[in-house]
Image (cartoon, rainbow, N blue to C red):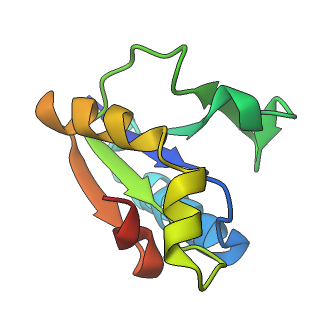
Amino acid sequence: MSKKVGLIVPHDYKLLSIAAILEVFETANKLSPVTDKPFEIMVFQLAEQIHQERLFGYEINSIEDSDTLLELILIPAFTTDNMSEMIAKNKKFIPWLQKQHQAGAELASFCTGAFLF
C-alpha cells in the first residue's frame, strides 16, 4: 500500500525545491522492487492560487476542497527573504497543516519551508 505524500505549492515557493522533492519521490517509486509504488504523490495549493490543472504532470488539489488525509506533507523552500510577509501570504495553509498533523501526518520542510510551521 502506497504512503500518501502531499506536496504543498505555496505562494513564493522556490521552483528548484519543488522539482527536487518530486524527483526524489519519483525516483524512489521507479526504483522500488515491488509492483505498487511506495509513494502516492499529491500536489496541493490554495484555491485562489490554482490557475492550471497540473504541475509537473500532477493534478493540483485545493486544500479547501480536499478531505484526503495524508501521511507525509512536504513544504518546499521559499524565494523570499521577508519571512513575515511570506507567512502572511500563506497563513491559510497553517490550519490545514495542523489538521493533517493532528490526524497523523508527518510534516517535513526544505530549508526556509520550516518557517511555515
Relative to 117, residue 6 above or below: above
Q: Residue at x 39, y 37 (%)?
A: 35
Residue 115: x percent and y percent?
37, 70
Relative to 58, residue 30 above or below: below
Residue 111 image-quadrant placement: bottom left
Figure quadrant of the C terminus: bottom left
Residue 68: x percent and y percent?
38, 19
Tag count: 0
Depth check, front residue: 21 or 34: 21
Q: Residue at x 61, y 27 (%)?
A: 61
Residue 101 image-quadrant placement: top left
For residue 56, side relative to residue 104 (left or right):
right
Relative to 34, residue 110 above or below: below
Q: Is residue 104 visible?
A: no
Figure quadrant of the N terminus: top left
Residue 5: x percent and y percent?
38, 42
